[in-house]
Image: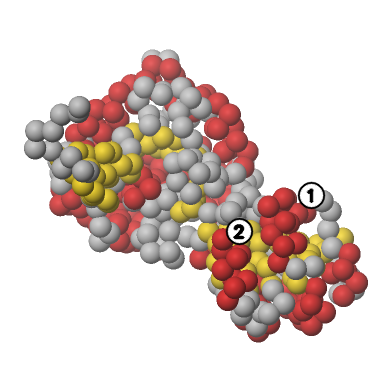
Amino acid sequence: MSLKDEAIELGKRAKEAARRLARLSSEEKNRALLRMADHLESQERLLLQENKKDLDLARKAKLSSALLDRIALDPSRVAAMAKGLREIVALPDPVREIVKMWRRPNGLQVGKMRIPLGVIGIIYEARPNVTADAAALCLKSGNAVILRGGSEAYFSNRAIGAVLQQACAETRVPQEAIQVVESKDRAIVQELLKLEDYIDLIIPRGGEELIRAVAANSRVPVVKHYKGVCHVYVDQEASLEMAERICTNAKVQRPAVCNAMETLLVHEGVAAKFLPSMIAKFKSMGVAIRGCQKTRSLVPGVKPASEEDWTTEYLDLILAVRVVKDMDDAIDHIERYGSQHTETIVTSNYQRAREFLDRVNSSAVLVNASTRFNDGGELGLGAEIGISTSKIHAFGPMGLEELTITKFVVLGDGQIRE
């Protein structure tokens, strides 16, 4: 079978499974999710054996320690996958929810009802836990899913997919609602991106290069998240003690994630008081600083920031720092160099906080809190399938509701249009 035929067959099976899945009740979907969680735990030994194959190949290929960590499974990570599925069971099912209803002068009742998107294609790198998380979120929201993980976790993804399918086979959920692409050939991705008759949405998860390649080649709508160049702005009326806690957490707690702070903006009125101690703390924690001219004049020994630094998602213990004239200057910087991901203001001025919320056009805007909170679990969505920095179809963390769309429903009692 050619790659094109293989992709079409995946699409056909997924589309039929989506039709059947959309008719199932919340109880039936939850029953399958619980069975999937049980099977992950009972098949832990198999999953770890298959994961060892991936790790052995990754070590032979001399992949980085960070990538090895993303690939690796252990008993605690298998347990975490199962726990995540059970947490999704506890979330409200958005499908068939009436989100709005109004009555027209002619007596018609008009409403909007949530329905599944249909078939979702997910293209992702490295992490095998995404296979379980994405499958569960799609299933709960009534969507069939085609999963194409990175070749680095090929055996792990295939094993997890087989375990989840077996669990589905013991319920009314069709096995084809969860399909893991078997082919290792990267060209299969190009064939999947052409399946506009079968796939309703593509969600790429990984580095900027992967996401741009998918967006450039897809005939199917793509949810994009190129990078997370996130900012914290420390206002002139900020509590500097609070600002220090927030900045430390935003940069250091987990620097290799998309919601970590990459640029610190500080009002010139507090820069002399705040930056020397803040940068000293960062350096003690291993953070390399790239600063503007004013930053370097306040803190000797800071490396100059280049124009490229302001647009870079470091995903590492590196931070760009700039002193700004005021909030307008900070917002201008964010609009020019940011990626519409996550921005925070630290201030005790209520009006300035409100203005920052109104004017900054990113997927999450925070007041007096770390950028690290732009996450589905932290924001109360329970789980997320990714963070969108495009504005169609969703903006920000994508949970169950963001994996649905609304249709109009109209209730009448014999009305005709005049």
Q: Residue at x 75, y 68 (%)?
A: 326
* Left-right relation of 28 to 345: left
Q: Is residue 118 visible?
A: yes
Measured as percent of width and height from the top left, residue 42 is found at 26, 55
Compared with residue 226, is residue 252 higher up or lower down, i.e. above or below?
below
Q: Hey, what amino acid is under mark 1?
A: Glu
Quadrant for residue 220, please give it.
Answer: top left
Residue 359: image tag? 2
Q: Amino acid at mark 2?
A: Arg
The residue positioned farthest toward the left in the image shown: 413
Secondary element under disc 2, as helix, strand or loop, is helix
Q: Secondary structure at mark 1?
A: helix
- Residue 317: horizontal and vertical position, in percent? 70, 63
Q: Picture quarter containing residue 411?
A: top left
Which sits in the foreground, 402 or 312? 402
The image position of residue 88, as x and y in percent, is 30, 57
Please report the residue visible at 37 percent of the width from the left and 59 percent of the height from the top: 381
Q: Earlier in the sequence, mark 1 or mark 2?
A: 1
The foreground one among 263 and 344 is 344
Which residue occupies the foreground of this view, 405 or 205?
Answer: 405
From mark 1 to mark 2, how far is it between C-alphas?
Answer: 25 Å
Image quadrant where one finds the N terminus: top left
Whether residue 173 appears in this view of the structure is no
Q: Is 359 placed above or below 295 here?
A: above
Crowding at dot 2, Cα within 10 Å, few <14 / some 14-19 / many 20+, comes out as: few
Its colouring scheme is secondary structure
Q: Which residue is mark 1?
A: 308
Q: In the picture shown, does residue 292 fall above or below 187?
A: below
